[in-house]
Amino acid sequence: MKVKGLKWILVIALLCVVTACGNEQVKEGNQAGTTGSGDKTETLRKVQLVLDYTPNTNHTVLYVARDKGYFAEQGLEVEIISPVQGGADAAVGSNNVEFGISYQENVTVARVAGVPVVSLAAVIQHNTSGFASKKDKGIDSPNKFEGMRYGGWGSPIETSIIDSLMRTDNADFDKLEIVNMGDSDFFTAVERDVDFAWIFYAWTGIEAELRGVDLNMVYMNEYNENLDYYTPVVVTGEKLIKEDPELVRSFLAAVAKGYQYSIENPAEAAEVLIAAEPDLNAELVRASQQWLSPKYQDDAPRWGEQKLSVWKGYADWMYSNELLNGELDAEAAFTNEFLPQ
């Protein structure tokens, strides 16, 4: 039942965007803005950061860094833009955007496909995603997946992870039915079409708590340490690192300051995101931020730090499950060089 052909679709999409001349949503990066009054005016360098998804508490600190002036302190005016076609990896790899938010799995596939994207920092130290179901279904371990309907989006990574977890728990993957959820949200799908789905607890799990929906969570990293990968990550392109390392260093200094603020002041950080994105559910943002803020740094010596073992472990797992066309040079896929000491 594994679906492996979609990896080619992702690779082709990435390469198509990398070879494109530009993107309508992306402006030239070397523009300048100004701030200040009277005779004293500071010139700010305009750069762009592309999100991976609609704004949520993974992104709070970016708004904190922007709206509390941390970027300006570093001489930067940062525009936060919506996801672009092909994703952040292709956008930064083709130098259309300076920075982006991505995921370790996407960076891994992109690197093997020849896209020169580099992970600069781990947004969260541990994988907080997992397979969620309503508690009354009794799906509290991978062996309970047998006979159930999984709602997914057709990714080969999904099926390989589920297969791996079920084998670890002595269950038969062929006894699982996979249903494409399409545009259905998690709560609609588990009421109507499926028994469980993959969610990020910091957002959908917290929303379930607010709705009074009791969930069982099967966290993949509890069954396989190689699945405790970084998701999401801050990314840029190799060319920018080579040609303008000080820009990368300044950007990360402001972002790290935003994370530190959000770790120490989750309630205040939530209000920054709510003010910046008023269409978000304010109650959900506040509750999610309280849950997520301690997990930004967690057990790492500093926010953002990444381990070679995590990059190698997940890439090895992907390769052994035929999700990669070649082996990853893990040391080239990430760097801790630009994180503040």
Image (cartoon, grey):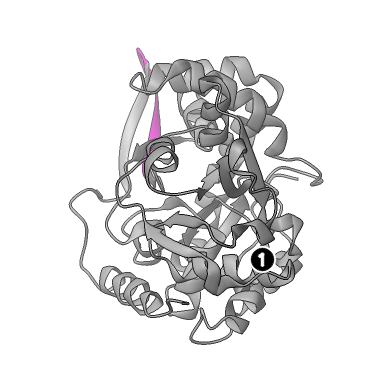
Q: Which residue is mark 1?
A: 165
Name the dominant secondary structure of the magenta segment. strand
Q: Which residues are magenta?
A: 37-48
Task: Give the quarter of the figure containing the C terminus.
Answer: top right
Task: Give the residue displayed 64% in from the left and 32% down from the top.
Answer: 292
315 in relation to 91, above or below: below
- The image quadrant that residue 16 belongs to is bottom left
- Comparing 227 with 91, the one in front is 227
- Comparing 339 with 227, the one in front is 227
124 in relation to 329, above or below: above
Coordinates of residue 233 in the picture (x, y in percent): 56, 52
Question: Is 41 in the magenta?
Answer: yes
Question: Is 236 in the magenta?
Answer: no
Q: Judge left or right: residue 193 versus residue 315.
A: left
Seen as rendered, the residue at the extreme bottom is 326
- Comparing 269 with 340, the one in front is 269
Please tell me how crowded label 1 is: few (under 14), some (14-19), or many (20+) other residues with Cα within 10 Å.
Answer: many
- Kind of residue indicated by mark 1: Leu
Coordinates of residue 155 in the picture (x, y in percent): 42, 66
- Comparing 95 with 272, the one in front is 272
